[in-house]
Amino acid sequence: MAKKRGQNEGSITKRKNGTYMVQLSVNGKRVTKYFKTKKEANKWRIDTLHKVQRGLFYPGKKITLAEYLEEWLKARQGSIKHKTLFQYRRIVEMHINPILGKIKLNDLQPSQIQAFYNIKVESGTGVRTVRLMHSVLHCALNHALKLGIIYRNPSDAIYKPKVTKHEMSVLDENQVKALLIAARGKRLEVLFKVAITTGLRQGEILGLKWGDLDWDTYQLNIKRQVQRVPEKGLVFSEPKTAAGKRMIVLGPDTIMYLKEHLKRQMVEREFKGAKWQDNNLIFPSSIGTPLDQSNLNRQYKQLLREANLPNIRFHDLRHTAESLMLKQGVSVKVVQERLGHSDAGLTLNVYSHVIPGMQKEAAQKMDEITAIYEINELIETTEGRNGLQ
């Protein structure tokens, strides 16, 4: 006989075979579950009621993957950036739901997920996009696992497609000079100087404000970035990673360039008058607002053509800066800090192509050291012999 409880508290009934049946009403639907002992039954009943009160319980056998993912996306609001949430939703609506969305959450099998990834790759979807689908699905299913909706994550058993690593594109010393010569006299001349001397990300450069620069110590504080967010436009946001908030030191030549840039900007502000929207940005648009990345990229590509340089991405200037620093013998730790990587291992992994050249240089230097030592030893030996005569 079922033990009577308060309204919406559920019931526990002992069955003829000695097991216990728990029944709950969730959102107007009856949820039934069976247990070997009354203690287990009551624990599940209490835990489930708590989840229902917090809006964290879904009747797993009934809900489809699409229905669960919608609830999961709503739950992520406020815990991740708007742009990231928008990207997750696009992945779910454009890729996951059309193929897997109608499958009941508890019926989802690893083989179905693997087939889904294979279909995407074979249809021409980029490997990075497929791996992003996996990240979104795996994260969502892990949450379902923690909530007790499912008892295993079916995406754990999946083989993800491998990303083919492409050789990094960088400019050498002469090409860097050619780019900066082509930029002379251009409105954004100093922006390219800063990009190459610091290795900042494009969004970080566009988010720099004059208040971030200490003219006396040459210190530049990276506190924000400019991003284009769907439905919101260009916005200021936190740096990409926790290590992205950092301080770097500029060289005296870069400081001199920035002083001249500020003078020109003051003239520009006065000329624009009421049209100028002051955001105190170091590299704003022609009316003071955050500079659109597409406009910057267009000007950058034009410079590459004028300088007869390879058609590399703006982001490759970041790779160029760090490669040049490593080749100049700058400490990996310092390069890591300027780059904003969380650890030096990542820096070495990304710029491993530089290491062979550094190895050769190190070998040559060690040869020079030992050669000098051998000459000194020879001189000392000869002088010693002469002294004995």
Image: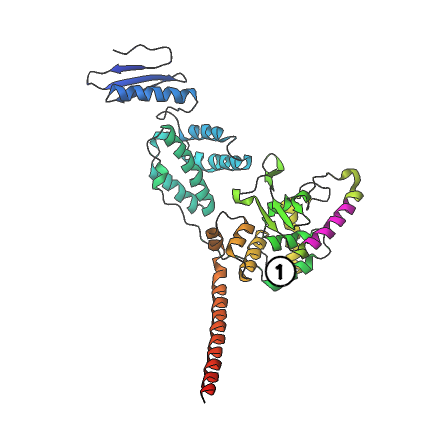
Q: Which residue is drawn at 54% across and 50% down?
A: 337
Instruction: Give residue 301's quadrant in the image.
Output: bottom right
Q: What stretch is highlighted in magenta?
A: 255-268
Q: Which residue is drawn at 40% across and 31% down?
A: 65
- Magenta region, main secondary structure: helix
15 vs 381, left or right, is left
Classify 342 as above or below 167.
above
201 vs 354, left or right, is right
140 vs 192, left or right, is left
Classify 88 as above or below 57.
below
Q: Residue at x 34, y 38 (%)?
A: 110
Q: Which quarter of the rendered picture does the C terminus lie within?
A: bottom left
Mark 1 falls on what kind of element?
helix
The one nearer the camera, 258 or 367, is: 367
Classify 54 as above or below 152.
above
Would residue 308 be seen by someone viewing this image from the given angle? no
Q: Which quarter of the rendered picture does the N terminus lie within?
A: top left
> What residue is shown with label 1?
176
The image shows residue 292 at horizontal and vertical percentages of 65, 44
Q: What amino acid does circle 1 point to? A: Val
Instruction: Work out which residue is located at the far front of the displayed protein and give it.
Output: 388
24 vs 329, left or right, is left
Instruction: Give residue 118's quadrant in the image.
Output: top left
Q: Which residue is drawn at 61% across and 38% down?
A: 236
The image shows residue 20 at horizontal and vertical percentages of 25, 18
The image shows residue 282 at horizontal and vertical percentages of 68, 46
The one nearer the camera, 320 or 332, is: 332
181 magenta-colored? no
Would residue 157 be seen by someone viewing this image from the given angle? yes
